[in-house]
Amino acid sequence: MTTVAATGHLAHAHHDDRPFIRKYIFSTDHKIIGIQFLFVSLFFLLVGGLLAMQMRWQLGFPGKPIPGGGILPDTMAPGGVILPEYYIQLVTMHGTFMVFFAIMPLLVGVYANFLIPLKIGTHDMAFPRINMWSFWSFFAAGLVMLASLFVPDGAARAGWTMYVPLSARHDLSGASLGQELWSVSIILVGLSSILGSLNYISTIINNRAPGMTWFRLPLSVWSLFITAILGLLALPVLSGAAIMLLFDQVLSTHFFDPAAGGQALLWQHLFWFFGHPEVYILILPAMGMVSDIIANGSRKPIFGYHSMVFAIVAIGFLGWIVWGHHMFVSGMNPTLGSSFMVSTLIIAVPSAVKVFNWMGTMWRGNLKFTVPMLNATAFVAMFVIGGLSGIYMAATPVDMFIHDTYFIVAHLHYVLFGGSLFALFGAIVYWYPKMFGRMMSERWGKVHFWLTFIFYNCTFFPMHITGMAGEMRRLYDPNQYTFLQPYQPMREFISISAFLLFATQLIFFVNFWWSLFKGKKADQNPWHDNGLEWSLPAPAPHGNWEKVPTVYRGPYEFSHPQAREDYLPQYVKLPTDREPASAPAAAH
Amino acid sequence: MHWWLPPKASTFAGPIDGLFIAILIITGVAFVLVEAGLIWFTIRYRSRPGRKAFYTHGNTRAEVIWTAIPAVTMVALGLISNHYWVEIKGRNSVPANAYPIGIHAKQFEWQITYPGPDGQLGTADDFTVRNQLHVPVGRPIVAHLSSEDVIHSFYVPQFRVRQDVVPGMEIKAWFQPTVPGTYELGCSQLCGLGHYRMRAQVFVHTQAEFDAWMKQAAQEATQ
């Protein structure tokens, strides 16, 4: 089939003979960019985890020196004892790293880049160079944020939500350069997301393989598509707000300074107008990839494919009109509280529909509990808890009591760790062979899964209880309050569970690195899946296909009565299949 | 350590706890159904030799049912919640006879201004006490909340009342204590490095005790 090579840049579909630096560093290959995002954001996941461990030490064992904490400078922890001003930096930077530099790039940076061209059947992104810039501005943002931990006054310390005037006025926060670097880094990370989103949207609209109609797209691609739209529209708001904040910090403007006529609540409106779509950016891709994995693991078509698509789209729309539920007790007009409550409760409906459809997919299936399937099932089980606990906060009178307590800390970790991170553990194992040509260890994957599942629940479930008792977030030492002192044993239990949870992740890291060099060589289609990416060798070559495959059906035709195997790939032509009338877009 | 909500000490606690329990029942049912279903499926439909999956793309009736039930439940919950929300936080919710107290938050203390013997804020007999909130039982209190510097949040868990205190705004929050005793007022919005120690004591007195305290405190303040 070498005649196809005449059509241009796909000539080098098997072979990238560019020099090392263009191939692996300043690469424009979507798969390499995805892998770059993977390595860098796994590193930031580790950083975020280390910050959390220090927080948990202080909460579990307040005032005691951290073992090995002597290496921390006296401005953070003299003699290993964490200072209050360091503690709030830990709180702030843990949230910042996890949201902007770990979960978001892991889901979107890695999997939108890696999966979209492979799953829709194209050679690369629509704009490969823009894609490269998306990675490098993310990388620069990460370096700036990392550097801010080491500046003289310390890192940003107003919480990852960076409420003004605390974040805008250095005399009130006690930090200066750290706060400014936070704003600079967020502007860069916004740029990265905007560039990336632009690319994902263009690619999905224009570059689908012949026969890949909208309703033959895998749900992972659908969710990444809606995520990209949310990103393209939400991140400019954050970037704009961060620019205003930076101006307040360094140019003495007063957008957010009430003492000079500014508005403190303006920041919250801008931040959450971005922040709530962001919540869905952090969960939709996870839902999409989990849908792919659950259909595969159940050997059944996804139950209610169209409802699943409509639910993703509905979440994408409703996500724009719920931001005020972060502000019920902020002093915002209480009548607005009523309308935000209703929209928030309604957004529970598409989430519920998705859960029921995942269960419908598993119903009467032939469930194969591979490591990805275990993690995907845990995603459903844990996301349900996070979704249901959200209803308490949506009901405004109850929110008045549990807002800003550990109840909401439990809620958001059930969604972001129990949801997004379990989905990611599944996705990393699932697409690992297509990235690196080797399999991760199944046995250690299972050990990692079960230990994570247990310690994760031991860490976060008790936070519901301390939240119900009224324990406020972001307290350096809750024992200052008499009514919170009896809960110290529970805080200690949470901390010990958190340390074990962190230690368990070492299994994952070792498995990841060991398999990179020593893992079992992967077959072309190790999970017997239907997606187009499995028609490629493992690892997928540069340029993907010489000639893009033609698509004959949807992505979830498992256990099809006409097929001999229990799967029927999208690219396999049955005698009854007709060629698609025309390609949806001129295939180059 | 008890595994439940704090003791009730204001008129808001009844409806808020009631709503909490209602949501606990609704979410509890959903939780048990989903988790039990998942566990049952993982056992019942696990792969065994010779097992074949049932080929289906879904069922429209099932989709309609499991869309409609959550939708109706959520709208009903919204209507009930809103009823209480309007009573607690609505624009016109503050009772006319509410006893006014000025609460000014600053890094990292609560400055509490009492109206003095005349019961009016903004008059010459007002006096201010740091980190001590004294209120009479059984009477609506309206706190006039203001901030010196950053955003703080007024939170008394036993009263189930919380309101952010925002610089540049004066926000009114009301509550009616029901049980005499001492409680803690905490800041629940990160306000800087001393956030964790920004607390005050709350004393709920009987009316007679409160009057006596007021007389004495006003005297001490004028000295």
Image (cartoon, rainbow, N blue to C red):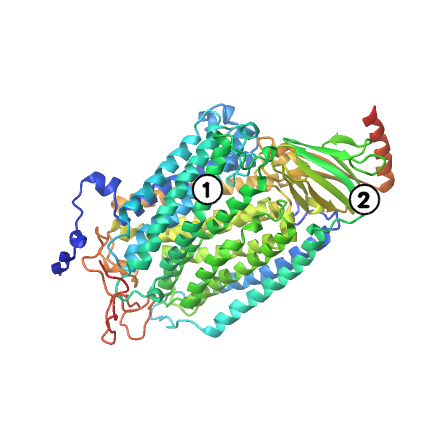
Please give left or right for residue A264 compared with residue A6 in the image: right
So how many labels did they put on this image?
2
Q: Chain of mark 1?
A: A
Q: Amino acid at mark 1?
A: Gly
| Residue toward you, B33 or A117 | A117
The reply to whether residue A218 is visible in this rendering is yes
Question: Mark on residue A240?
Answer: 1
Residue depicted at 24% across the width and 42% down the height: A24
Residue depicted at 46% across the width and 45% down the height: A237
Q: Amino acid at mark 2?
A: Val
**Most extreme residue toward the left, as rendered?**
A3
> Which corner quadrant holds the C terminus of chain A?
bottom left
Quarter location, residue B130: top right
Residue depicted at 62% across the width and 58% down the height: B23
Question: Mark on residue B207?
Answer: none
**Most extreme residue toward the bottom, as rendered?**
A576
Please give left or right for residue B118 compared with residue A456 in the image: right
Label 2, residues with CA under 10 Å away: few <14, some 14-19, many ≥20: many
| Residue toward you, A139 or B144 | B144
Let me know if marks 2 and 1 both belong to one chain. no
Q: Position of residue A416 (x, y in %)?
A: 47, 49
The residue where tag 2 is placed is: B137
Q: Chain of mark 2?
A: B
Q: Are marks 2 and 1 in contact (CB under 8 Å)?
A: no
| Secondary structure found at label 2 | loop
